[in-house]
Amino acid sequence: MADGGVSRLASQRAVVIFGTSNCCMCHAVKTLFSDLGVSWAVCELDKEPRGKDIEKALACMVGRSPPVPAVFIGGKLVGPTDQVMSLHLGGKLVPLLREAGALWL
């Protein structure tokens, strides 16, 4: 797969976070989504058998290395922590989550 399987994994749930188990920024994003009442899935690259391939594909998509956390909402790349927080502070994250079916209220 050209994208290391990222597209397939990212489309399995309304919110998918690609991260690592010991990443503090990944934890911050997970906490934000949990506090918002969002059910999310995580792909922890350090525990994934094909984690290095996925990480390389994400680095190309995100435009930086390391690429984590990389957040997908509705199967579309939103970006790393700064993009997610910017959307949240701008009042655009919740509508995006609703549109993707990740929030009901």
Image: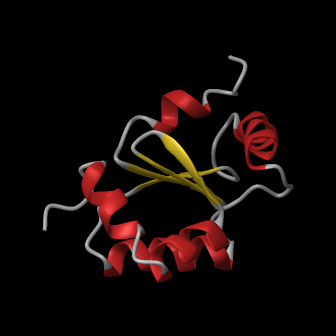
Q: Residue at x 47, y 78 (%)?
A: 90
Q: Is residue 61 above or below residue 44?
A: above
Q: Residue at x 80, y 46 (%)?
A: 59
Q: Is residue 45 above or below residue 9?
A: below
Q: Is residue 52 above or below residue 32?
A: above
User: Which residue, as the protein is rendered here, is positioned at the far right?
Assistant: 65
Which quadrant of the rendered structure holds the C terminus? bottom left
Which residue is nearer to you in this view: 23 or 46?
Answer: 23
Taking the image as shown, residue 101 lies to the left or right of residue 64, namely left
Which residue is nearer to you in this view: 3 or 51?
Answer: 3
Count of residue discs: 0
Quadrant position of residue 85: bottom right
Q: Residue at x 25, y 73 (%)?
A: 37
Which residue is nearer to you in this view: 64 or 16?
Answer: 64
User: Which residue, as the protein is rendered here, is positioned at the far left?
Assistant: 105
> x and y percent of residue 102 in the render?
27, 56
Quadrant position of residue 58: top right
> x and y percent of residue 61 in the render?
74, 41
Which quadrant of the rendered structure holds the N terminus? top right
Taking the image as shown, residue 69 lies to the left or right of residue 43, namely right
Which residue is nearer to you in this view: 39 or 91?
Answer: 91
> x and y percent of residue 66 in the render?
82, 58
Taking the image as shown, residue 46 lies to the left or right of residue 36, namely right
> x and y percent of residue 25 in the render?
65, 76
- Check the image and tell me how it is coloured: secondary structure
Q: Residue at x 25, y 58 (%)?
A: 98
